[in-house]
Amino acid sequence: MQDLSLQVLGLGVPHLDVLNPLVRLSLFLQSRDVTLADVHLMVRSTVSHLESLKEKKSEALLKLEETKEVAGMPLTATGPFNSGSLINKMVTDMTKAISIRFADLWDEVKFTEIANLRNWPLEELKDYGCDHLDVAMDRFKNTLVQQGVHLDELQDQWTLLKTLVHKKYVNKLTTAKWTQLWSSFSDMGIQDILTLMDLLRTLPATSVANEASFNQMKLTKTNRRQRLSNMHLNDCMVIQLESADILDFDPTSAVNKWMILDWFRELCNKAQILCIG
């Protein structure tokens, strides 16, 4: 086996260190239920993770530089190797690219972070989110009015919601769900602010759902099914996209429904007669 170069593997390990958080970010953005608030938090966390690589090298890279071997195989060095400058350049370029790609998260849609409980500070909730709430009210004024939301009461309800959440979920804020908040507080006069939070959480964060729909449509309407009507194609798409995963699907109710149909009973009777005959 030829000698392994420290410079070559020394390039690979820092690349893996930088790519790992980016892979996690990519997989997260492909989730079906991700919201703008979730994306804002994940992107911000990814940037922080990348920045931390400038200050602290990974254990794999430290071990490589110390032992100068991989899986017991010694590495040969043909020149000086400076992983620090390489990581700094990669992280700087990558964080700059992320800032450009997700620039609207910091400005245009930053106000949606109030809809993610994991963004809420554990302390000092008094003034948190008031400015973001004003932006949301201005952006969706017409939609909220059409839904019967009282805009002049949103700030008061926001303050009350923060107080209720802090008292009940003081130690479980990061794991609380908005469905739990609806069940607990919907009868306490804060339906308007809960409605606004639902609106912020339903804003599409990515185009993953659209891309997945196009892929499913291509698999459904193939060259051999060109006569499939739009109505039937729509029904097939709804079944494929909205039904439960095959591992979670329980067919019991569907089977029971089919078994009580008259034509199904007649078919079973005919089958029994044929078997007896």
Image (tube, rainbow, N blue to C red):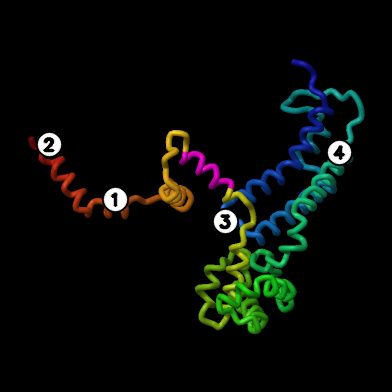
Quick one: label 3, few (<14), some, or many (20+) residues within 10 Å? Answer: some
Residue 237 vertical placement versus 133 (above, below): above
| Nearest-to-viewer mark from 4 and 1 | 1
The stretch in magenta equals 211-221
In this view, the residue in front, 208 or 276, is: 208
60 lies left or right of 38: right
Dot 1 corresponds to which residue?
255
Q: CA distance from mark 3 to mark 1?
A: 30 Å
Dot 4 corresponds to which residue?
86
Residue 234 pos. (x, y %): 45, 50
Q: Residue furthest top?
A: 1
Residue type highlighted by circle 3? Asp
Residue type highlighted by circle 4? Leu
Q: CA distance from mark 2 to mark 4?
A: 77 Å
* C-beta proximity under 8 Å, tags 3 and 1: no
Q: CA distance from mark 2 to mark 1?
A: 23 Å
Dot 3 corresponds to which residue?
33
Is 97 covered by the magenta stretch? Answer: no
* C-beta proximity under 8 Å, tags 3 and 2: no
Closer to the chain start, of discs 3 and 2, is: 3
Residue type highlighted by circle 1? Val
**Residue at 81% from the left image edge and 32% from the top image edge:** 10
